[in-house]
Image: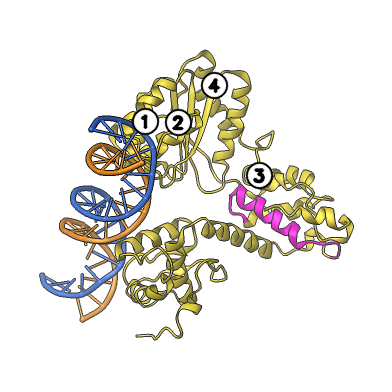
Chain colours: A yellow, B blue, C orange
Amino acid sequence: VPDITHHFIYPLHLTGIVIVDHQVFADDHVPDRLVHRERAVGTLSRALEPALHDQPPEDLLIHGPHGVGKTVLVRHTFERLEAKADVDYVYVRSMGRSAAGIIRAVLRHMGANPATNTPLEDLCLRLRERMTRPTVVVLDEGDDLPATALRRLGDVDLVGVIPIVHDADAWLSATEPAVRRRFRSAQLGLDPYDAEELADILDPRAEQGLRGSVDRSYLEYIGQRAEGAARTAIQTLRAAAHLADPELPIERVNVDAAYHQALSRIRRANLRSLPLHHHVVYEIVRAAGDDGVGPGTFHDAYDRVSDVVYQGREATPLSKRDRRRKLAKLDEYELIDQAENRHDTHKACDTSITSEFVDLAAAVDVPDER
DNA sequence: ATTCCACGGGAATCGGTGGCAA
DNA sequence: TTGCCACCGATTCCCGTGGAAT
């Protein structure tokens, strides 16, 4: 949440705030120019090109590691296309959604509001009815998309599908052959940036978003620390700006400290977005500290605290199977490292991140070790 | 080689909720 | 309005798989 209040309450020069434009650091900020992504913009534009002539856009599988700008690439390219042609663009965060959930999200974008229990078949019918112009459906976070969703969207004329995933090979081999054929030769991979490129990406943001200028070499340090991910680099710069003040110019802010603050902020937001069960599971893992907790011990601990933790809440404790699903989710969100096998341990990535909803210390006196 | 047990895919089940007919 | 049904999403149940210990 942007901290704007200080601007109005205190004279700027008396505060530690050097950020003058929060928007350029927001995750959904789309810059006018995508630095070092010219070729990717070209490839994507060519896939969308048929839409300019009222033809369905081509399917394209976009892949690459965290934070290399997959989503921004799509938004940026589409905004330009939209200015030129009568094309629709639907962006769906598909993580965890069923086939019906995805189709429903597309329909909602088109102005329909189908009930959650409308049959998938009906949803698809309505989708066809409403599809009157070329439409690009972007399925972000599409690593485990239900094949049904892809098949159904593929059946609709005028629709081009753009799944965004991390690992293209894994994705293709996990899906059904028909889908594989569609995307095998329609891929766009984004590589991590190097430190120089990241500095180029940070530079205009520092210019626009911060009071005063920032040394190029400092931006490069951040670039090195961010390991190829633009999102991490941008959030690190932002954290550094927060840590700076009139006494401590931004270049003197420790990059490591800023980096960790940025990571921790991202993880905190991730945890907050999850429902109660995940918080309980997370807190049990976190309570084990840096040594972690083996799967067996984890389940014992869960059983021991569950009565108290769930007391007075409508939710009830989970089966072992579902605890494993929650652990997998937490791993996905980079909140824990899940045990690889039964002799390994689950570990919290950052034990300083705590749940706002669940407090185990208040729930149990002393967890006795067995 | 055998045993132990967590893992994780998939089927079955449950609870909630629109839509619809009486 | 009421009662029923179909459907979804969440969860549990079931079970084959496989890594590590013995």
> Where is mark 3, residue-wise?
A197
Between residue A336 and residue A363, name the one nearer to us.
Answer: A363
Between residue A348 and residue A42, name the one nearer to us.
Answer: A348
Q: In this view, does C14 lie to the left or right of A186?
A: left
Q: In this view, does A21 lie above or below A115?
A: below
- The kind of residue on which mark 4 rests is Val
Q: Where is residue A276 in the image (x, y as percent from the top left)?
A: 45, 62
Q: In which quarter of the image is the C terminus of chain A?
A: bottom left
> Where is mark 1, residue-wise?
A123
Q: Where is residue A227 in the image (x, y as percent from the top left)?
A: 58, 54
> SS at mark 3?
helix
Residue A295 visible in rendering: yes
Q: Distance between the residues labelled 4 and 1?
A: 21 Å
Q: Nearer the viewer, mark 2 or mark 4?
A: 2
- Region in magenta: A226-247
Between residue A344 and residue A24, name the one nearer to us.
Answer: A24
Q: In this view, does A283 lie to the left or right of A98?
A: right
> Residue A220, labelled with which disc?
none
> Where is mark 4, residue-wise?
A87
Q: How far apart are marks 3 and 4 (CA)?
A: 32 Å
Query: Do dots 2 and 3 share one subunit?
Result: yes
At horizontal 43% and vertical 45% (from top left) the residue drawn is: A167
- The kind of residue on which mark 3 rests is Glu
Circles 3, 4 touching at the beta carbon (< 8 Å)? no
Circles 1, 2 touching at the beta carbon (< 8 Å)? yes
> Where is mark 2, residue-wise?
A107
Between residue A54 and residue A343, name the one nearer to us.
Answer: A54
At horizontal 61% and vertical 53% (from top left) the residue drawn is: A232
Disc 2 or 3, which lies upstream in sequence?
A: 2
Task: Tell me the chain of label 3.
Answer: A
Q: Nearer the viewer, mark 4 or mark 1?
A: 1
Query: Do dots 4 and 1 share one subunit?
Result: yes
